[in-house]
Amino acid sequence: MADITTLSSANRHTATEILSQQALMANSPALLRMHSLVHTDFTMDGANSLTRKINKYADQGVASAGAEATDPSPIPTVELDNAAAVSGAVSMGVKEVAELSEDLVTTELGLTSSQAYALFTDQVAIPEASWTNMLRPYIMQMAKMGYRKIETDIIALMASLSNTVGDGSAAVIELIDLCTAIFQHRKQNPTLGPQFGRFALYTNQIERLTKEALFAAGGIGGSLWNNQADFGMANVPEGQMQANGFFGTFLRRPLHELPDDLANVDTGAQLAGYGNFGVPGVSADAPQLGGASGAFEISYKTPLTFRVQPDVSKATIEVTMLARYLAWEVADGEAVQITTKDES
C-alpha cells in the first residue's frame, strides 16, 4: 500500500517555489542597495500636494562675545533666517501592466472551464486580495522589475552631484580617485560629519581597484599596505554581503557594490559616489537629525502597489503595478561624484 499523499509531499509549487521567490526577494542584495542607504520619507502618502519641500537652516555665522551683566547692543544681535528650501515633485515612477491569459490562469490555479467562466465574468465575487494571493508568482516577478526601476532612479542621482573627482573621459578608476573622494568630502564640511562617508561603486570598478591594490607596482608588497592601510574589500568573507550590498572597506570606509547592469552611464563615463547618502528609514528633515541630512531621499506617495482585476475583454486577468515617488538630491555637499571611464 502506498503512502498517503499529503500537503508536505505534493504541494511543491505553492510551498516551495512561491516561498522561495519571496526568500530570494528578501535576501537579494541586487535589488535595494542604494535604496537602503538613502533617506526614506512616507509623509507624501495622503498629502494634498505632489510637492515635497524641505526647509533648510541658514548658516548664521559665528556668535559674538559679550560682557557679564551687560545687555547686548544693539538689540537684537542676530536675525534667525532660513536658507532656500529645496523641493521636488512626485511622479508616476513605475507603471507596468501585464495580462494573463485564461488558459494560463486556469492551468496554474487548477480551475475548470466553468469555474474560470464564473471568475472572468464577475459572476463569482473574489476580493482583490484573494486574486493577488493566487497570482503571487507573477506579482513577485513584476515586483523585481519595479524595484529595479526605483533603484536605477536613485543611482542616477549621482549625476546631479556638483563636486566631482576622477576623469570620466580618459581614465579608468584608480585607488587615488578613492583617496581624493575622501578628502574632497571632508573639505565640503558635511553636516552629518565625514565619519559617516561610504563608497558606492560598480562591480567592474571594484574588480579593477582590487587588481591595482594586489598586483600593480606598490601593491600588496608596497609600503602602503605594509603600514596597515585597510583594503578589506579584497577578502570580504563569503556570505557576508548584506542587503545593502556591503562588500568590504577601503581605508576603513564602508564600500557597497552596485550592479553593473544598473550603472548610470553618462557620455561614456560611469558615475559612482562617496559620501553621506542618507539615513535609512529616516526622512531628510526628521527632527532627530537636527537640521543635518544626507545627500539623497526617496519620497513615496504610493509605494510599489499591485491591482488585479479581470480585463474588460473578460478573456484575461490584468495585473497593474505602480508606484508614485520622488528620488531626489536634498544636500549637494554631503556626497562626491566619482567619474571614471565606462568599462561595463
Image (cartoon, rainbow, N blue to C red):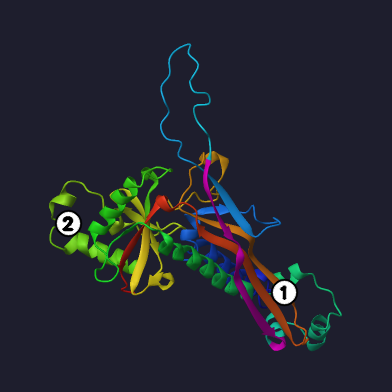
Where's residue 267, x and y in %? 36, 74
Q: Is residue 83 magenta?
A: yes
Residue occupying image coordinates x 72% and y 74%: 308
Residue occupying image coordinates x 74% and y 67%: 129
Q: Which mark is residue 220?
A: 2
295 relative to 140 in the view: left or right: left
In terms of sequence position, does the residue under pointer 1 or pointer 2 come before the other?
2
Tag 1 residue:
308
Give the secondary structure at mark 1.
strand
Amino acid carrying mark 1 in the image:
Val
Q: Which mark is residue 147?
A: none
- Counting other residues with Cα less than 10 Å from the Cα at mark 2, is it few (<14), some (14-19), or many (20 or more)? some
Residue 323 seen from this side: yes
Disc count in the image? Answer: 2
The magenta segment is: 82-103
Give the secondary structure at mark 2.
loop
Label 1, label 2: how far apart the Cα atoms are:
57 Å
Where's residue 13, x and y in %? 62, 75
Q: Nearer the viewer, residue 235 or 96?
A: 96
Q: Nearer the viewer, residue 119 or 309?
A: 309
Residue 12 seen from this side: no
